Amino acid sequence: MSYYLQFLANIGIGGAHPGGLPLTKAVLAAEPIKKSMHILDLGCGTGQTAAFIAKYYGCQVTALDIEKKMLEKAATRFAQDRLDIRIVESSAENLPFKERLFDYVLAESVLAFTEVSKALKQCFYVLKNGGQLIAIEMTKEKEDTLTDEEEQQIKSFYGVKEIMTEHEWYDKMKEAGFEKVQVLNVGDKYSKKGLEELSELKLSQSFDFHALRIWVEHQELMAKLRHRLTYRVYKVRKTDPCLKN
């Protein structure tokens, strides 16, 4: 795990993805989510999004993360809110679920930190026919928008293996089996924001305040690359084979 991801786990951030919970709410508001549906919050962190979905939509929610410290905070949140949310400790590349279980998989700044091709195939596997993956992910504006030195710095700091353009994300999603790939228009309110927006800081007892230097470095990187390294909201569907021509 990169120093940056360790920092997020230690500081206990409720929402550290682009646009924060307001963007999540805006994206989900356009979806026909029903109480009977089952949603996977992939890389749930401290459970902010999972809790919102369970409370607002009343559907079945599973919250998954690879970081135990995050899940402990999520469990506390769910208990306080009296929410019946299943918690699973696992990676996005090895989902411990049966095939065609979920109506939606939601990944908020998660897939970029994984072996993307493998994680996408896992998402495809666990989605029902007609189910959808919504992913809010780091995206570089153009193929040559970053220097080799900048790319290496980003990979080292964030622990990502690939920094992809919109077109490259599209290709990865198609390769995973998804038939319909969309980039959602989230409007001016969110489109020019930085990569991350913090909320709900819940420090772990063992938190080392010297780790704040990690946050300073993150802010410096984001300021430097603000218009070259942004994000997109991707929405992809698993098409029912029976509906193909």
Image: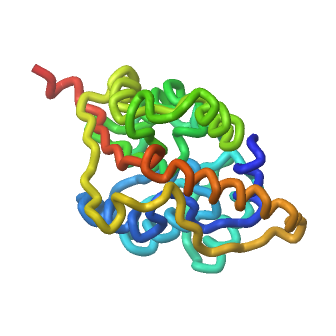
Q: Nearer the viewer, residue 92 or 158?
A: 158
In this view of the protein, can residue 115 be seen by the observer? yes
Q: Residue furthest left?
A: 245
Quadrant for residue 85, please give it. bottom right
Q: What residue is shown at x 62% (from left), y 75% (from top)?
A: 200
Q: What residue is shown at x 53% (from left), y 54% (from top)?
A: 62
Q: How is the protein colored in the picture? A: rainbow
Residue 138 drawn at (x, y percent):
48, 44
Q: Nearer the viewer, residue 2 or 56?
A: 2
> On the rendered structure, is 31 left or right of 210?
left
Quadrant for residue 87, please give it. bottom right
Quadrant, the N terminus: top right
Residue 76 drawn at (x, y percent):
70, 71
Q: What residue is shown at x 34% (from left), y 38% (from top)?
A: 128
Residue 120 drawn at (x, y percent):
46, 31
In this view of the protein, can residue 99 be seen by the observer? no
Q: How many marks?
A: 0
- Residue 156, relative to residue 220: is it above or below? above
> On the rendered structure, is 213 left or right of 100?
right
- Residue 154, relative to residue 121: is it above or below? below
Quadrant, the C terminus: top left
Q: What residue is shown at x 68% (from left), y 73% (from top)?
A: 201
Q: Nearer the viewer, residue 52 or 227?
A: 227
Residue 51 drawn at (x, y percent):
52, 69
